[in-house]
Image (cartoon, rainbow, N blue to C red):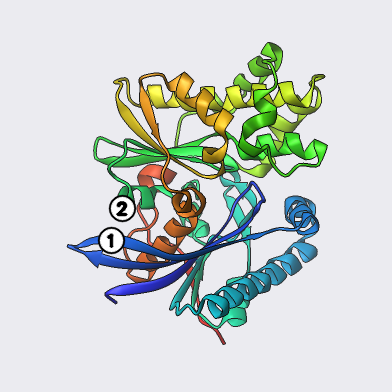
């Protein structure tokens, strides 16, 4: 096909909702390009968000039930999006919602049954992008770097500040990427304690003060010393990070303030480790790009090494969904959509499982 009409779906670890992007993806001068036509975000209500958050504790039977029902729910959201906006997609490309991610044990699991999704919206679906990479010895993450290479190669770094912070970059002819640290997963966990979904513009964190003891404990987490490729999951966060937060006797403001300094310090340290020279450019997307306090502290820690570039709002919010739309297209074209240089797999692959509506 010369042009693909795709809806990309993304549900991240920050648990704020489902992102949908309707995009035209096409080849121009033998290079893939895109046009974002329409977008929509569907917020999870508190009960649904809690159900997804606690899915890691479900029995196998109940987890499979949620896998199927969530797939149907995704399909209904897509069908409504199509109908209300008069869209004509030929493909749905879905990330699913990650419940388990333990690549060191050889498994990962994203709920959102592809068959239920396809049947509910009547459109072909590509999903389950991670499993194949794990069979090839990879981390099964991160995946967005393929989109960074194809769509955003004019930046030295592409940083995503979602539930987890990660970035990708080109070095010695290879695209490299890895998860850096928890991000909104951690910040949201803290403000959830005062019944807020997130810290709007970082105003609460800005009002706090640094807790040196907490900062030292967070910076000492063993993950930060591990070589890449490497990736993080919610189970790691529960095991390694939550106990540190829970044992800290301090105000919400101070804990939040300190965690912002922790996350930005890790990002800055990794950026400087990757490229020793200054005057690089860093494209920042994801929910964290809207946190004014976070972005100020990050630029302060990067100093002259990297200049932060924040794109238009539609890319901040929907870049990941856009890249999954691209990954679905690459799967249909049998082109590489998962890079071994990123995941540590034995080879590049064209991953994803196809489901036709019945």
- Asked if residue 193 lies left or right of residue 127, the reply is right
**Residue 22, x across and y down, in percent:** 46, 68
Q: Which residue is drawn at 31% across and 21% down?
A: 278
Disc on the earlier residue, 1 or 2: 1
**Residue 219, x across and y down, in percent:** 60, 20
**Residue lying furthest bottom in this view?**
358
Quarter assignment of residue 254: top right
The quarter in which the N terminus is drawn is: bottom left
**Residue 288, x across and y down, in percent:** 55, 39
As rendered, which of 61 and 44 lies closer to the eye?
Answer: 44
- Asked if residue 32 lies left or right of residue 249, the reply is left
| Residue for badge 2 | 150
Q: Residues within 10 Å of mark 1 (few under 14, many from 20)?
A: some
The quarter in which the C terminus is drawn is: bottom right
Report the number of numbered marks: 2
Quarter assignment of residue 229: top left
Q: Is mark 2 on a helix, strand or loop?
A: helix
Let me know if residue 101 appears in the view: yes
As rendered, which of 283 and 106 lies closer to the eye?
Answer: 283
Q: Residue at x 44, y 63 (%)?
A: 325
**Residue lying furthest top in this view?**
212
As rendered, which of 4 and 327 lies closer to the eye?
Answer: 4
- Tag on residue 32? 1
Q: Which residue is drawn at 66% across and 43% down?
A: 234
Let me know if residue 143 appears in the view: no
Q: Is mark 1 on a helix, strand or loop?
A: strand
**Residue lying furthest left in this view?**
29
Q: Residues within 10 Å of mark 2 (few under 14, many from 20)?
A: some
Quarter assignment of residue 244: top right
Q: Are marks 1 and 2 in contact (CB under 8 Å)?
A: yes
């Amino acid at each position: 096909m010369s042009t693909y009409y795709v809806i990309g779906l993304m549900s991240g670890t920050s648990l704020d909702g489902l992102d949908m992007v309707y995009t035209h993806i096409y080849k121009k001068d033998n290079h893939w390009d895109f046009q974002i036509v329409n977008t929509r975000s569907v917020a999870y209500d508190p009960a649904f968000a809690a159900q997804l958050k606690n899915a890691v504790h479900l029995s196998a039977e109940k987890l499979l039930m949620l896998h199927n029902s969530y797939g149907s729910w995704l399909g209904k959201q897509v069908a409504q999006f199509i109908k209300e906006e008069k869209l004509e997609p030929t493909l749905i490309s879905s990330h699913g919602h990650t419940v388990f991610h333990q690549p060191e044990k050889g498994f990962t699991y994203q709920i959102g049954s592809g068959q239920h999704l396809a049947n509910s919206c009547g459109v072909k679906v590509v999903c389950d992008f991670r499993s194949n990479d794990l069979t090839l010895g990879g981390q099964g993450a991160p995946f967005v770097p393929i989109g960074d290479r194809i769509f955003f190669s004019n930046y030295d770094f592409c940083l995503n500040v979602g539930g987890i912070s990660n970035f990708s970059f080109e070095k010695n002819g290879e695209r490299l990427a890895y998860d850096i640290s928890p991000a909104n997963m951690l910040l949201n966990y803290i403000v959830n304690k005062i019944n807020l979904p997130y810290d709007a513009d970082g105003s609460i964190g800005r009002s706090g003060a640094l807790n040196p003891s907490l900062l030292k404990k967070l910076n000492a987490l063993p993950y930060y010393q591990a070589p890449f490729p490497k990736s993080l999951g919610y189970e790691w966060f529960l095991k390694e990070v939550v106990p540190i937060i829970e044992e800290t006797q301090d105000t919400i403001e101070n804990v939040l303030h300190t965690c912002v300094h922790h996350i930005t310090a890790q990002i800055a340290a990794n950026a400087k480790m990757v490229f020793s020279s200054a005057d690089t450019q860093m494209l920042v997307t994801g929910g964290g790009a809207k946190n004014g306090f976070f972005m100020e502290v990050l630029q302060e820690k990067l100093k002259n090494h990297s200049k932060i570039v924040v794109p238009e709002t539609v890319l901040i919010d929907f870049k990941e969904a856009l890249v999954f739309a691209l990954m679905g297209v690459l799967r249909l074209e049998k082109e590489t959509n998962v890079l071994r240089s990123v995941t540590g797999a034995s080879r590049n692959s064209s991953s994803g499982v196809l489901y036709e509506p019945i």
